[in-house]
Image (spheres, rainbow, N blue to C red):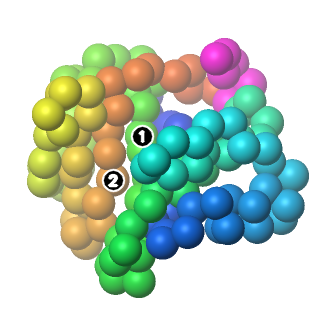
Amino acid sequence: MVSRISDLIVKTPDPARLSRFWCEALGYEVTATDETGVAISGASNAPTILFERSSDSFGDNNLHLDLCPTDRSQADELERLMALGATKTDVVPSGSWHVLADPDGNKFCLMAKRIPAEPNDFHD
């Protein structure tokens, strides 16, 4: 099988302002806020967009993908992605996700949470 995008992460100095814009543009609603930023969601099968507070939001990698395995463990999916050419760049202290880079160096995260392969099968 494959991985699916669960979250899109956008770095910004003002998560509240940017989330308001995208809520209006996409018909999404704010689903969570904390000191790190704001999450917005639309339909249950659509990716969540996380607006992450960052003072260096105008550099590289302002947007990255979070992937979730669909039919295997995180460890097995990590192995598969690395065989495709991904490289490991970091593991968060909790170990719940891995930070990887694609062959061009674009970072993305592999989460521990599994989600269904088919968007219509998504359940919270």
**Direction from residue 71 to residue 123 in the image, left or right:** right
**Residue 39 on image: x %, y %:** 60, 45
**Residue 3 on image: x %, y %:** 44, 35
For residue 67, which numbered disc appears in the image?
A: 1
Quarter holding the N terminus is top left
- Whether residue 123 is in magenta: the answer is yes
**Could one spot residue 88 in this view of the protein?**
yes
Instruction: Report the residue at 34% width, 77% height from top.
Output: 56
Instruction: Report the residue at 68% width, 36% height from top.
Output: 31
- Mark 2 Cα-neighbour bin, 10 Å: few <14, some 14–19, many ≥20: many
**Residue 70 on image: x %, y %:** 46, 24
For residue 108, which numbered disc appears in the image?
A: 2
Residue at the farthest front position: 35
Q: Which residues are magenta?
A: 119-124
Q: Are marks 1 and 2 in contact (CB under 8 Å)?
A: yes
Q: Amino acid at mark 1?
A: Leu
- Mark 1 Cα-neighbour bin, 10 Å: few <14, some 14–19, many ≥20: many
Which of the 4 image quadrants contains residue 117?
top right
Quarter holding the C terminus is top right
Instruction: Report the residue at 41% width, 83% height from top.
Output: 58
Which of the 4 image quadrants contains residue 16?
bottom right
